[in-house]
């Protein structure tokens, strides 16, 4: 787009506002871009872009994948910028372009990595053509925004530019079908011991062939619609992957990359972490980094502490685990991780939507799409539910088969740690929404204090 005198006036005003916000100690990650777009709707399109742009989107995992990619790029000496600490919607992208340009709008770095909210693609991708685009997966999400995954697929297909090279999840038949005429590579986890044909989840968003509606024959279904299948009617099938995990071990994984095997370290071997790590590896390889370099660098990188963090306390574990509010698939994965974690577990559930809770308005039907049944396992010895919707979650847990004597629930989040029966669990999980990390961290401190006191009492 042509840059007019008015564009340069908007650029100057927005950069000046950003400068003043920083002087006042504000982070300026969103408002300068929001102002620029309000003054000039085509601002993102008119701003000069770096020589190479990488975009990462998808329902779940995009922040973790983006952080892994950015960590590797940083440790390998790449000169780039990203929105790790900013918004992944259009105003955040505009702010990032402002922050990494001179006063004439020219980019100060040659590479940019953008995490993009899939529902903002219509406001970003028409004005910024990626050189590489990764999609982690397509699931149903918050009912308020994108509960229908086929709508999200149509949305992305409409706004992702033609010809952009795609990196897609081969085990997700919706994700793998995005932009079918674009060049693409796929990543996949090969069938592992324990993978079966049936799904243990309530939500199944690919009940039939995405192409013809025919019956699918599943080779394996890992969870929800993630797995490998072929249509009995038209032959449509999960694609062959270019990056395939062939072997999963406790601390690493073997990945076949176009016929060559490489070993990569893992922070943990839960399927969510494996998919996220594999997606990052695929993108970094397509970007041009050698697999051996990626493997060496990943060895010193863990999962983002805002997504998952374990800390040992006198032989037991306190674990922070993101469980995105009103996202039944993300919560189901977290619940299964709790069930599958070794030993006896307790879990503190902060599942209320942060913004809705401020107005006491929330659609609770998502609770009945989430697999609370995983928490009825006998190894889960206590569940503590805190927040405005504690009665709703309590009822859902009862319907999932959790005995009432294992559940404590309360309206005030401040009382959650006090309710913990510290003598019983080997690990305590704290599940929280993306906007309540501070609450989770404060609760974790109280939990660790309680575990230390219990250990001291036992020592006496």
Image (cartoon, rainbow, N blue to C red):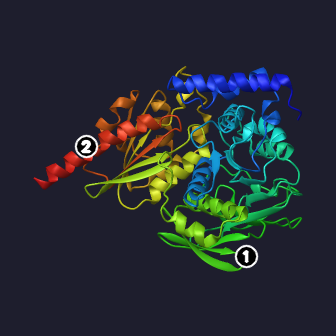
Looking at the rendering, which quadrant does residue 278 occupy? Answer: bottom right
Quadrant that contains the N terminus: top right
Q: Secondary structure at mark 2?
A: helix
Dot 1 crowding, Cα within 10 Å, few <14, some 14–19, many 20+: few
Percent across and percent down for residue 364 are 58, 32
Give the Cα separation between the discs numbered 1 and 2.
50 Å
Q: Are marks 1 and 2 in contact (CB under 8 Å)?
A: no
- First in sequence: mark 1 vs mark 2: 1
The answer to whether 219 appears left or right of 3 in the picture is: left
Q: Which mark is residue 258?
A: 1
Kindly report which numbered mark, 1 or 2, lies closer to the viewer in this rendering.
1
Looking at the rendering, which quadrant does residue 218 occupy? Answer: bottom right
The answer to whether 318 appears left or right of 435 in the picture is: left
Residue 287 visible, this orientation: yes
Residue 35 visible, this orientation: no
Counting labels gives 2
453 or 205, nearer to the observer: 453
Q: Is residue 233 above or below residue 53?
A: below
Percent across and percent down for residue 15 are 67, 27
Q: Is residue 446 above or below residue 427?
A: above
Q: Residue at x 45, y 56 (%)?
A: 339
Name the residue tied to disc 2.
450
The answer to whether 202 appears left or right of 378 in the picture is: right
């Amino acid at each position: 787009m042509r840059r007019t005198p008015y564009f340069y006036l908007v650029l100057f005003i927005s950069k000046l506002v950003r400068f003043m916000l920083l002087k006042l100690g504000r982070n300026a990650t969103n408002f300068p871009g929001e102002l620029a777009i309000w003054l000039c709707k085509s601002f993102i399109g008119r701003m000069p872009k770096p020589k190479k742009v990488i975009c990462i989107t998808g329902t779940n995992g995009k922040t973790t994948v983006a952080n892994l990619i950015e960590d590797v790029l940083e440790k390998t000496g790449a000169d780039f910028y990203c929105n790790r600490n900013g918004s992944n919607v259009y105003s955040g992208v505009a702010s990032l372009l402002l922050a990494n340009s001179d006063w004439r709008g020219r980019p100060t770095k040659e590479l940019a990595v953008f995490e993009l909210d899939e529902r903002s693609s219509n406001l970003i991708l028409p004005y910024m053509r990626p050189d590489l685009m990764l999609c982690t997966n397509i699931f149903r999400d918050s009912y308020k925004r994108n509960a229908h995954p086929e709508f999200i697929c149509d949305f992305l297909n409409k706004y992702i530019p033609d010809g952009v090279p795609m990196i897609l999840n081969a085990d997700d038949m919706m994700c793998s079908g995005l932009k079918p005429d674009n060049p693409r590579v796929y990543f996949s986890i090969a069938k592992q011991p324990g993978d079966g044909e049936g799904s243990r989840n309530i939500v199944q968003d690919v009940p039939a062939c995405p192409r013809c509606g025919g019956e699918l024959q599943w080779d394996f279904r890992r969870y929800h619609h993630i797995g490998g299948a072929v249509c009995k009617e038209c032959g449509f099938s999960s694609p062959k992957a270019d990056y395939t995990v062939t072997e999963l071990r406790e601390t690493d994984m073997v990945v076949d990359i176009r016929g060559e095997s490489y070993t990569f370290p893992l922070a943990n071997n839960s399927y969510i972490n494996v998919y996220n790590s594999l997606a990052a590896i695929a993108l970094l390889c397509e970007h041009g980094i050698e697999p051996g370099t990626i493997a060496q660098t990943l060895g010193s990188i863990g999962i983002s502490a805002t997504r998952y963090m374990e800390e040992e306390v006198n032989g037991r574990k306190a674990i922070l685990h993101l469980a995105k509010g009103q996202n039944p698939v993300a919560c189901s994965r977290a619940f299964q991780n709790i069930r599958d974690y070794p030993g006896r577990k307790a879990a503190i559930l902060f599942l209320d939507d942060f913004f809705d809770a401020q107005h006491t308005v929330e659609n609770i039907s998502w609770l009945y799409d989430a697999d609370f049944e995983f928490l009825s396992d006998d190894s889960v010895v206590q569940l503590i539910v805190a927040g405005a919707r504690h009665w709703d979650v309590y009822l859902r847990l009862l319907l999932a088969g959790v005995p009432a004597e294992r559940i404590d629930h309360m309206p005030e989040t401040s009382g959650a740690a006090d309710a913990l029966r510290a003598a019983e669990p080997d690990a305590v999980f704290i599940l929280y929404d993306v906007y309540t990390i501070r609450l989770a961290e404060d609760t974790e401190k109280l939990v660790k204090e309680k575990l230390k006191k219990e250990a001291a009492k036992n020592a006496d």
